[in-house]
């Protein structure tokens, strides 16, 4: 089957660290291996709701929210990086050449849709891989809210992996 000029060499895998995302990463690893492509992993740290921040600040005995944020961010970023690296190393063990390099893990604070689209464009990815699990309103019309928003705005093909049963 001719593929024309379609080449997938750089893949972005967006994760929310859920079990659905772990399931989707298996597809990203297999596809990267089959296409001899590299995989970059992106996790966006969404801002907590104000009530959740206030509660954490009080429980952890911080004087203010800025102090909590400053103390928590480096530790949280490192823990997320270790979690992602462990997930990826496990996949690499199963798929010999899945194209994962621990140096290609991006953890960035912000809003998931905007950050994902920014990286797709700036780093010129050929494919986005993400999991999907709807939340409410008929499961966000059968696809997750973040996934749906990315699909509407992206300029690259997207492989959406549904939640496994």
Image (spheres, helix red, strand yellow):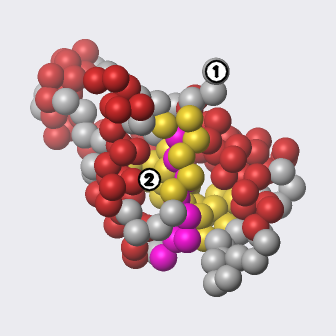
Q: What residue is at 70 percent from the left and 69 percent from the top?
A: 37
The N terminus - image quarter: bottom right
Q: Which mark is first along the chain, 2 or 1?
A: 2
Observer-nearest residue: 78 or 107? 107
Q: Residue at 48% across / 37% down in the picture?
A: 132
Rate crowding at label 2 as few (under 14), some (14 to 19) or many (20 or more) other CA atoms within 10 Å: some
Spot the residue most to the bottom: 5
Q: What secondary structure is marked by label 2?
A: strand
Secondary structure mostly seen in the magenta stretch: strand
Coordinates of residue 43 in the picture (x, y in percent):
45, 48
Q: How many marks?
A: 2
Magenta part of the chain: 124-131
Residue 86 shown left or right of residue 54 in the figure: right
Dividing the picture into quadrants, the one containing residue 145 is: top left
Is residue 75 rendered to the left or right of residue 26? left
- On the question of residue 39 being in view, the answer is yes
Between label 1 and label 2, give the one nearer the viewer: 1
Question: Cβ–Cβ below 8 Å for labels 1 and 2?
Answer: no
Above or below residue 48? Residue 78 is below
Q: Residue at x 76, y 45 (%)?
A: 91
- Per the model, the C-alpha gap separating discs 1 and 2 is 28 Å
Considering every residue shown, the one lying at the far front of the view is 1
> In the structure shown, which secondary structural element does the residue marked by tag 1 occupy?
loop
| Number of the label disc, if any, that sits on residue 107 | 2
Q: Nearer the viewer, residue 79 or 17?
A: 17
* Position of residue 36 measured from the top left corner of the image (x, y, whole percent): 77, 69
Q: Dot 1 corresponds to which residue? A: 165
Front one among 18 and 47? 18
Q: Decide if residue 20 is on the left or right side of residue 145.
A: right
């Amino acid at each position: 089957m001719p593929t024309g000029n379609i080449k997938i060499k750089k893949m972005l895998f967006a994760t929310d660290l859920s079990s659905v995302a772990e399931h989707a990463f298996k597809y990203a690893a297999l596809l990267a291996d089959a296409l001899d492509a590299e995989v970059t992993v992106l996790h966006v740290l969404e801002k907590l709701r104000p009530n959740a921040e206030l509660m954490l600040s009080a429980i952890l005995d911080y004087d203010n929210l800025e102090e909590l944020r400053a103390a928590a961010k480096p530790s949280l970023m490192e823990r997320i990086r270790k979690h992602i690296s462990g997930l990826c190393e496990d996949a690499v063990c199963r798929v010999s050449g899945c194209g994962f390099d621990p140096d290609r893990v991006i953890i960035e604070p912000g809003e998931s849709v905007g950050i994902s689209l920014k990286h797709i464009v700036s780093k010129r990815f050929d494919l986005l891989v993400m999991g999907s699990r709807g939340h409410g309103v008929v499961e966000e019309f059968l696809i997750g809210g973040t996934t749906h928003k990315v699909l509407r705005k992206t300029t690259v093909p997207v492989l959406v992996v549904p939640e496994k049963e």
